[in-house]
Amino acid sequence: MTLKGNHYVWMAPQPEDIGATPIEFLHRLPGPCWLVLPGRDRSRSRVMATLLHGNEPSGLMAIHRCILAGIQPAVDIHVFLGSVIAARTEPLFSQRFLSGHRDLNRCFRPPFNDSEGVIAQHMLDYLTALQPECLIDIHNTSGSGPEFSVAPFDNALHRSLAQLFTHRMIVTELRLGALMEIATPKFAALTVECGGANEHSSHEIAYEGVVRYLTRSDVLSDASSTTIFEVFDEPLRFELEDGTALQYGEGPIDDADITIPANIENYNFGDFHRHQILAWLERSAFEKITVKDLYGNEVRDNYFEQRDGCLFVKQSLRLFMATTRADIALSDCLFYFVTTDAISAQPGNGPGNGSGNGEVG
């Protein structure tokens, strides 16, 4: 293992090196680091990132399982493991990021002037030098729910990558400093959300998709998929103002500004209709809700209304990434949504429009 910048590079880790379990593997990692898995074709490379959030273990489990199984990739695979220290903080896999630090997956744009920014900048420098043909970033959702992908572009390259894992792709121009934002129309970079961190199905989805990503000679064109592929265009974020008192329950809770139904996660990728209560509101709590469009304009009133102390939608919406983690709901967002007419469904992608190396932007 060698040190380059502030990252370690672990070349060709063997099954006997990584420990018998993902926990042993986690404890053998020195911190933010790269694993290099040599492929049959050493002239090409792909990148996989995971553990950018310390409470999202499916990607780590998947790559550990692949190494234990002795799977040789089709091309060189460079795996970046980010928030290793947060993941090791007891209880294990409980901390999205360390207290007093920034979310690493919000740091892939300037300024790079703190410890997380330095990690992100060194990773971007590594990618620029490597010039891989594509990148996937493996995550778990904050709440329970089915798997999906997120991309900055809707094109054949991104759809082909997505279909290694899922038949759903969210397309967004929102820029928060996430790793996938390095994508260009010719360089596919994709976020994969495998489902809840504590669900066995999420770990299986991650593993099966990673095996396909590692072993297929071409992952940027797909001539085999016949499933219906759903594209969710430009979702909006349902956010709460600082200082909002948030609770979850079966009805309004005393001292809460906003009470969200305790089963809100059940609506992930389901439709929410006008007659359903989305929340119970106290006093002027409606004003604590904010929904901004891509240009920073407040558009809350286009989608939500308050009636008789309850929050309702004005038109049918499709929710996703709804969480019952109050800390995440308050620091990030409660859920994303699109109108149901913003969803396109069509047969799975045919042959892609390119499979050579793209240029990392």
Image (cartoon, rainbow, N blue to C red):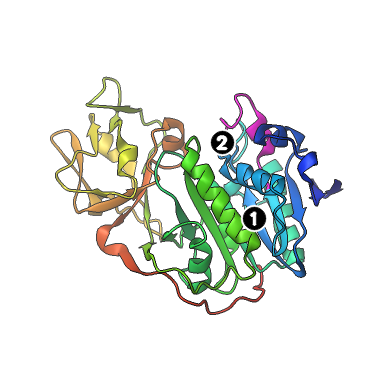
Rendered view: 257 above or below 153: above
Helix, strand or loop at mark 2: loop
| Residue drawn at (50%, 56%) of the image | 165
Report, in whole angstroms, how far the alpha carbon at label 2 lies from the one at label 1.
17 Å
- Return the residue found at the far top: 254
Q: Nearer the viewer, residue 333 or 357?
A: 357
Q: Is residue 86 magenta?
A: yes
Placement of the C terminus among the 4 image quadrants: bottom right
Q: Which mark is residue 55?
A: 2
Amino acid of disc 2: Asn
Crowd rating for badge 2 (residues with CA inside 10 Å; few <14, some 14–19, many 20+): many
Location of residue 24 (image quadrant) = top right
Q: Is residue 292 left or right of residue 283?
A: right
Q: Give the vertical position of 251 relative to 209 (above or below).
A: above
Residue 124 seen anywhere in this rendered image of the structure: yes
Does residue 153 show up magenta in the picture?
no
Q: Which residues are magenta?
A: 81-96
Q: Position of residue 76 (x, y in %)?
A: 74, 62
Residue 127 lies in quadrant: bottom right
Total of numbered circles in the picture?
2
| Magenta region, main secondary structure | loop
Q: Is residue 190 left or right of residue 326?
A: right
Residue under the image location 69 percent in, 52 percent down: 79
Residue furthest bottom in the image: 353
User: Residue 251 appears in which quarter of the rendering?
Assistant: top left
Asked whether disc 2 touches disc 1, contact meaning CB atoms under 8 Å apart, the reply is: no
Furthest residue in direction front, as rendered: 69
Q: Amino acid at mark 1?
A: Met
**The label number, if any, that marks residue 284 in the structure image:** none
* x then y, percent, for residue 169: 43, 60
Rendering coords of residue 328 (x, y %): 46, 36
